[in-house]
Image (cartoon, grey):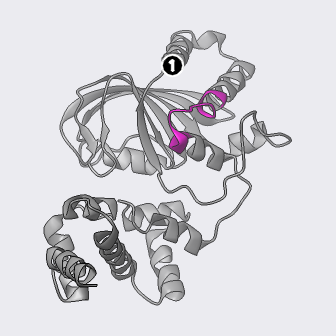
Amino acid sequence: MINYHQSIELSGLPLFSWLTFRTPLGEDEALPIPSEACYAYIIKGDNHLFHKEAEIYARKGHVILSLCGKTMGQIVNEQEEGHVNSIIIHFHPKQLKKLYDSTKPPFWEEIESPVSQYIVQTAATNLVSSYFEGIKHLFQNKEAITEEILILKLKEIILILLQTKSSPEIINIIRSLLSERVFSFKEVVDAHICLPVSIQDLAQLTNMSLSTFKKEFKKIYNSTPNAYIIDKRTEKVANLLKLSNQSISEIGYQCGFNSLPHLSRVFKAKYGVPPTEYRLNFSDKQLSF
C-alpha cells in the first residue's frame, strides 16, 4: 500500500519523489517510479528483504542505485512484508543530456564495457545523508524552489556519486548514464550472462519489449534466451569447478544459479555427471597426471 507520495519536477519530469509504502503492494498497485535510473535513500525501513539475488534490503540509512526504475519498483513488490520511507532521485536521459550537452562533469570517464551490476546497495556516507536532509527541506519549502536550485542539486549528487571511491559499481552506473558510447545487443547480453538477471531485466537493459528482445535474441544466437543463458552459465560452472576451491553452491550462485538442485540437474544433462562427480573426476585426472 502506498501511504504517501509527493514529487518535485524539473522540466515537467519528476526529479525527486518522497514515498512511504508497505510491501508487498496490492495487486493493482505499482510504485510510481519511471523506467529511468534512480537513486533511493531509505529514511526508515524494517530491514526486510527486497531482492535476494542482489542482497538488497530495506535498511535505514542505506542507498540503492538502480539502472532501471521499473526493476526497482518490481523488486520491492516481490519480497517480504515491511514498511519503507524513502526519497528517490530520478535520472532522466533528457535532463542529463541537457545538463551536460557541452561538457561532462568532473571525475567522469567514458565506460569501456556495458554495466554488469545494474543495482547496488551501500550505507549512505555522511555527505550523502546530509544531501538527502537538504532534499527533505525542499519538500517542506516548495514555494522557494526554482529551476536553478534543482539543477544545482542534480549536479551536486552526480558529482558526489562520481567520487564514491568505496563503490566502483556506483561510479560505473553514473558514468554509464552520461556515456556517449552505444553498445550492441550482443555486448549487453554477454556482459550479463552469468549475473542474477531475468529475461525481463535483459530486455529492459537493451531498451526493448520482451517480445522484441526474444526475436532479436533468436536471430543473433539461434537459441531461446533461457536455453542459451543456462548453457553458458553451466559452462562457467564447469570451468570454475576445475579452478576454484569454492563450494559448488557458491560457484553456482556466482554463475547465476539460485538453486543447487537446479544447477545439478542442468549440469548432469550437459556433462553426464553431477557437479560433485565432475570435480572429483577432474581432480583424479590431475593427480594421475
**Relative to 172, 258 lies left or right:** left
Front in this rendered view, residue 155 or 252: 252
Specify whether residue 177 is painted magenta: no
**Relative to 144, 272 lies left or right:** left
Identify which residue is drawn at 34% across, 80% down. Answer: 231
Identify which residue is drawn at 21% across, 75% down. Answer: 279
Identify which residue is drawn at 22% across, 45% down. Answer: 79
Say above or below: 218 vs 199. Answer: below
Q: Which residues are magenta?
A: 159-170
Could you say which quadrant of the image residue 84 lies in?
top left
Provide residue 24's location: percent of width, then percent of height. Answer: 23, 41
The residue that label 1 is drawn on is 132
Provide residue 210's location: percent of width, then percent of height. Answer: 44, 70
**Relative to 132, 102 lies left or right:** right
- Can residue 107 be spotted in the picture? yes
Could you say which quadrant of the image residue 175 lies in?
top right
Identify which residue is drawn at 35% across, 74% down. Answer: 239
Front in this rendered view, residue 146 or 134: 134
Say above or below: 185 vs 63. Answer: below
**Relative to 69, 184 lies left or right:** right
* Circle 1 residues within 10 Å: few <14, some 14–19, many ≥20: many
Front in this rendered view, residue 285 or 136: 285
Provide residue 129's location: percent of width, then percent of height. Answer: 48, 18
